[in-house]
Image: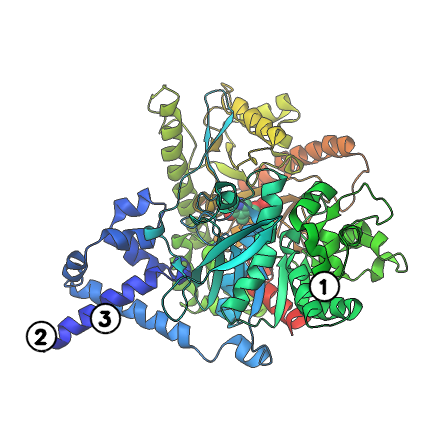
Amino acid sequence: MAKQNISSTQSLVEGLHSLSKNLWWTWNTDALYIFRELSPRLWERTNHNAPWVMADISEQELRARLGDKPFAKRVDAVLTRFKAYMSDKNTWASSKAKSLKNPVAYFSAEFGLHESVRIYSGGLGILAGDHTKSASDLGVPFVGISLFYRQGYFEQKISADGWQQEQYINVDLHRHASELIVDKNGDAVVCEIQIGFSTIKYIARRLRVGRSIIILLDTNLPENEERFRDITAHVYGGDSTTRISQEILLGIGGIRMLRAMGITPSVYHMNEGHSAFLTLELLREEIAKGVPKVKAIQNVAKECMFTTHTPVPAGHDRFNQDLMTYIFGEKAKNFGMTMDELMTFGREHPEDSNSQFCMTVLALKMSRTANGVSELHGHVSREMWNFMYPEKKVDSVPIGYVTNGIHVNSWLHEKTQSFWNEKLGTDWPEHFLEPAYWKKAVDPLSVSDEELWALRYTLRRKLVEFSRLRLQEQYSRYGNGADIYNTVLNPDALTICFARRFATYKRAPLLFTHFEKILSLFNDTKRPFQIVFAGKAHPRDDEGKKFIQKIIEITKHPNLFGKVVFIENYDMNVARYLTSGADVWLNNPRRPLEASGTSGMKISINGGMNCSIMDGWWREGYDGHNGWTIGGDEQPADAHVQDTQDSQFLFEVLSEQIIPEFYNRDANGIPKKWIKRMRHAIATLVPQYSTHRMVAEYVKKYYL
Ligand SMILES: *Cc1c(COP(=O)(O)O)cnc(C)c1O
């Protein structure tokens, strides 16, 4: 009897260690609670890093803690559920995508999987992470490829004068979810790429994300020169030489690592043009086999697909001839071309010999199919790249669309999860592909107005308290350590959030264009509203940093202090608080530059609603009753005219619709009309804008 107990404790210990190394725990809260409970302070200090918690706890402590029977029972239940998930043969893909035997190889310069794995910068990475998780949930065989950025993306602090400061922190390999990829002798798998005349060695680390894996390439080896070791230092770091080196490693290096690991993908999916050099490696393999160039290109294109993510011209990577020559040198001949022919191949306008090599052009030419990330973006992309297909009309340019989604379970507050567990039963996350289910889920028979309003209050309170703690810390750094905790933010007030990268086209300060008018709204003490900002500007984007500075300036205005706040260091954790606590999620990009946007999708399951420009996903998501729009479905050609108009539209929708509806209460203080709109938003948006729907669409339209 005693013996059996010991061996089962041993298996729980081992089980917990391997569970901490699979990011499945990030979207299964019963698993996450266990790690948090093991060391609550360390959990907070490490930004919720389960492998770190496990590394800090001795074998002895773990065994002792598992002596607590109810705790051991919970651990056992989680491990059983995890095992069942990992070995489930009865997945969506097992019936809907039977012929997809080999994995989809999904190349992305960043993956946003969890706040503790800092290899992402913004929406592109989050999308890749959510794609990975849904592929796992649906049973779609999936391998992600990216880089192991040892200092990740920067940590943001704001100086007293409102200027963004960037800090980089080294990853601790012994307290990280990834593990070194080794061969059967236990030695690291080492591959090589060439950059100019240098040979660079690299290894790889594996992240487990449920049933999916992600391979992260790393050049940080003592045998490499310092400048090559730094290729994998920062997400989108350095100058254009670093950038092209990162892309060589990702594309060419990625294919070589897959080969070394014996993985044969069924399709190569390029998430944005950063990885398009992979097509040159595939081409080299074909040419080496003796296939003639034209046929070789066709063969490569048969296996590749490409998703483009931005209509902003500067958002498409371009490299000049000198850089390309330095990088490729003599090697163009491996692709069956001279260096000049290679340059011409990647030019937007081949006849213009001064123009640069464009990664999007390469990706488009070397893919059997391409897509944008919303209906409008598909259309804009067809127009944008029409010149490459002069024989085709806009509508027949071969760029379709798959609208983005989010992995719902990664974006709900734990209170939201327990709320729906109680109302719908714990199997509700299995129904994202069934719109009818969600229509029923929000029927007044299954959930009352009072219950929904209580949920909104709970989530707003969580956001307010989280923000107060963060702001207290921020303000004490400026030397005015006065206790501001109870003077900032109001848990009863209509709460609007604006958080995303501070790229200028997203127009963070738009609301304050007509400052006096908006001030009068803020001064209405009977109908208080407040706005929480967060977001990082790219280290080289001074215009974006000026926008942050402008917002910081506004937060200091005597009539706005505590009503307009800026939370530092936007990451997935901050995003989860904001997207769950927001009553209204504000999105006011300059149309049509927001290809899709995904942050607004995260709020629906939490009962928040969108107020957005008719751009990206919202142009399809909005049905007249599930949120609000800023302006209509057309735009003036001139950007400044657009800015002026949109700021006026934003003021109008806020003052004439949103604020009055929020404060239109019945005798019990319930905003009936608001909640009706909320129900409709959940029913129409939750199933449609999940990555389950998105991945299923990629499988059906493209992967199969
Ligand atoms: C969702 C998310 C984004 C994307 O926001 P958009 O509004 O779609 O640009 C960026 N950063 C983080 C941390 C996110 O969670």
Q: Where is residue 605 shown, x and y percent of the image?
A: 50, 56
Q: Is residue 302 left or right of residue 253?
A: right
Q: Which residue is located at x 69 percent, y 48 percent?
A: 310
- Label pair 2/3, CB-CB below 8 angstroms: no
First-in-chain label (3 vs 1): 3
Q: Where is residue 599 shown, x and y percent of the image?
A: 56, 48
Viewer-proximal residue among 465 and 295: 295
Q: Characterize the local packing of mark 3: few (<14), some (14-19) or many (20 or more) Cα atoms within 10 angstroms.
A: some
- Label pair 1/2, CB-CB below 8 angstroms: no
Q: Which residue is located at x 21 percent, y 66 percent?
A: 72
Vertically, is 489 above or below 346?
Answer: above
Where is mark 3, residue-wise? 11
Label 1, label 2: how far apart the Cα atoms are: 62 Å
| Element assignment for label 3 | helix
- The reply to whether residue 402 is visible in this rendering is no
Q: Is residue 367 left or right of residue 461?
A: right
Work out which residue is located at the far left of the displayed protein and give it. Answer: 2
Q: Where is residue 54 shown, x and y percent of the image?
A: 27, 55
**Image mark for residue 2:** 2
First-in-chain label (1 vs 2): 2
Q: Amino acid at mark 3?
A: Ser
Label 3, label 1: how far apart the Cα atoms are: 47 Å
Q: Where is residue 630 shown, x and y percent of the image?
A: 68, 41
**Image mark for residue 367:** 1
Label 2, label 3: how far apart the Cα atoms are: 15 Å
Work out which residue is located at the far right of the displayed protein and give it. Answer: 391
- Looking at the figure, which quarter contains the C terminus? bottom right
Q: Amino acid at mark 1?
A: Ser
- Looking at the figure, which quarter contains the N terminus? bottom left
Q: Characterize the local packing of mark 2: few (<14), some (14-19) or many (20 or more) Cα atoms within 10 angstroms.
A: few
